Amino acid sequence: MSFYDRLSVRQKQTVWAWGFLAIPIVFYVVVRFYPTANAIVLSFQEWNLLGARTWAGIDNYVTLFHDPVFWKVFRNTFVYLLIGTPVSLILSFVIAYHLDKVRFLHGTIRALYFLPFMTSAVAMAWVWRWFYQPVPIGLFNNFLASFGIAQIEFLNSTTNALPAVLAPAIWAGLGFQIIIFMAGLRAIPKTYYEAAHIDGVSGWTIMSEITLPLLKPTIVFLVVFSSIGFLRIFDHVFNMTTNNPGGPLNSTKPLVLMIYDTAFNSFDMGYAAAQTVVLFVILLIVSLLQLRLLRDR
Amino acid sequence: MSANLSSSGSSDLQVQASSEALLSGSTAPVRRNWAQYLRWLLLFAGGILMVMPLAYMMSTSFKFPFEVYNLNLVPEEPTLENYTYVLEDGRFLQWFFNSLIVATLTTVSSVFFDALVGYTLCKYRFPGRYVVFIAILSTLMIPTEMLVIPWYLMSQQFGWLDTTWGIMFPGLMTAFGVFLMKQFFETVPDDFIEAARIDGLNELQIWWTVAMPLVKPALAALAIFVFLGNWTAFIWPLIVTTSQDMYTLPVGLTTFSVEQAVEWELVMTGAAISVLPTLIVFLVFQRFIIRGVVMAGLKG
C-alpha cells in the first residue's frame, strides 16, 4: 500500500486505468486477435481437423481462384448486396420521408414497420419458406390462385430463389433503416425549409439541394451497415434451403454458407480459412470506402 | 462504424435532440387534403403489409391442420393443440431456457465490461490509451465468420464444445459497446468525477456510483442491442452445440422445423414461441427501445 501512496495522482490513475483494462485486454487478445491471426495462418495450411497442420503455401487461394463454385458464390454474394442495399434504402427512405409528415397514429404506424426488426431471422425464414410453397400449401401461390393467376416457382427455381431468400432479409431490416432515416430527417433544421419556402423553391429542388445533402452521413452509415449485413447473409439462406443448403444448384449460396460447408461438412479447415480471409478483405474494402466517403463530407 | 477519438460535442447534442424529437411524434403541420389522406392510407396499408407475415404466423399457430392452407386470418376453430404438442415435446422449454441464460449473461457481461472500458478510455489520460482504443476498435472490422473456425478449434482444445460457456464466450464483450459507451461518457462532466475524487471515493466507486447512473439510457440501449443479437444468434451456436439439450432457440427451431417439414402449423408454433418474447418486450417498451435504437445506431 505504501508503494501506491507514494505515486502521483496521475500515476495512480494510470494504475487504475490498466487495472480496469486488464481483463478486457486478455479477452480481446485471446478471443479476437489470436483467432484472427490463427485464421490467417490456417489459410496457408492444409488441415482436416484430425491429422497434423501442414504448410500449403498459397495452394488454398489458388484452388479457390480455380473453383467454379467459388465464383458462383462470389457472384451470389454481390447480387445479395447489389439488390438488397438499394432496394431497402430506397424503400425505407420513401417510407420515412412520408411517415415524418403524418401525425395521426404516427407511433402506431411506426411500430408496425419496426416490429419485424425484433424477430429472429431463423423463425422468419421458416414463415416465409411456408409462404413460398407451391399450391395448395404456400400462402403466396394460394393467393395468386384465388385470382386465377398461374403459380410462381419460388424456392425451386434457380432464377427466383435468390430474390425469394433476399426478400425476408430486406423486410426484417426495413424498420431499423426507417427509424434511422427519420432521426436524420428530424436533425435537419426547420429554418432551411422555411427559407426555401419563402424563396418559392420547388419540392424536387428542396429534396436534392437540402434534404439529401444534409442526410449524407445518415445515408453513408446505412449503406455500409446494410451492405455488411447483406454480404454476411447466412441465417435466411441456410433455413430456407435446409434440404439442399444454398440450392437449387448453388443459386442462392452466399460466401458465409460456403465457408460453413467447407469447414464443418467437408472439414477442409485450411480452405475454409482462405475463404474467410476473402470475406474479411471484402468487408474491409467496404468499411474503408465508408471512411473515405465520410471524410469527403 | 465511424471512429473519432476526439468526438465533437455538437453531434452528441444533435443525436440526443433527434432521438428525443422522434419520440414526441410528428411535428408536421396538420393538413387536411386529399394528398395527405392518401399518404396516410398508403402508409397504413404498408404497415399492415409489414406485419402480415407475423399475423399469419400467429394465426396458423392456432389452426388445426385442415385449416392451415386457407387464407383466412382468424381461425374458424381456434385451438391450443399445437402449443400443447410443442411444449409437451419438452425441448422447446429447454431451448428457450438456454437462450435466456446465454442472452442474459452475455448482456450483463458486455454492458459491464464495455462500460468499464469505454469509461477508462474516455476519462483517463494514460500512456497507451490511444493504442488500446484503436486496437479494440479495429476488431469491429473482423467478421464473426472469420473467427468461428479458430473459436471452434479453441473450444475443442479446452473442452468448451457443447457447453453454455462455449456458446457465450465470444460475446462477453463487444467493441461496438466500448465505442458507444465511450461516446456517452463524454457527456459526463469531468467536474463531477473530480468532486467525487476530493470526497475520497476510489476510482471504482466513482465509475460505479457517479458516472454509471448518468449514462443509464445508453446502458439500456446497449443492453437491448446485445440481448437481441444474442437471442437471435445462429451461426456460432449452430457450430458449437452438438447435443439437442444444449441448443439455443434458433438452432433448436431449425432442427424442429426440419423434422416437422410438412406440418406447417407446428413450424409456425415453434416460430411464434421464439419470436413472441422479443415482440412483447418491444410492444411494452416501444418508446424506450426506439430511442435506444436511434442512440446506438447514430452513435455507432
Image: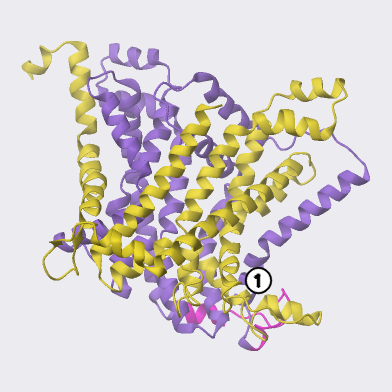
Chain colours: A yellow, B purple
Examine the rendered structure and indicate whether residue A243 appears above or below residue A52.
below
Q: Position of residue B15 (x, y in %)?
A: 56, 29
Q: Nearer the viewer, residue B98 or A79?
A: A79
Residue drawn at (25%, 71%), measured in percent from left and top?
A267
Total marks placed: 1
Answer whether residue A107 is visible to the viewer in this image. yes
Q: Please identify the residue farthest to the left as the structure is shown.
A: A2
Examine the rendered structure and indicate whether residue A125 appears above or below residue B27.
below
Q: Please identify the residue farthest to the right as the structure is shown.
A: B33
Please state which amino acid type lies under the numbered disc 1: Tyr
Residue drawn at (18%, 15%), measured in percent from left and top?
A11
Q: Residue A75 vs residue A205: left or right?
A: left
Q: Nearer the viewer, residue B274 or A294?
A: A294
Examine the rendered structure and indicate whether residue A145 appears above or below residue A213.
below
Q: Quadrant of residue A147?
A: bottom right
Question: Which chain's residue wears label 1?
Answer: B
Residue annotated with mark 1: B56
Q: Quadrant of residue A166?
A: bottom right
Q: Quadrant of the C terminus of chain A?
A: top right
Q: Position of residue B80 (x, y in %)?
A: 58, 79
Please give the range of residues in magenta. B66-87
Answer whether residue B71 is visible to the viewer in this image. no
Q: Nearer the viewer, residue A198 or A128?
A: A198
Helix, strand, or loop for circle 1? helix
Q: Position of residue B107 (x, y in %)?
A: 37, 48
Examine the rendered structure and indicate whether residue A15 appears above or below residue A276.
above
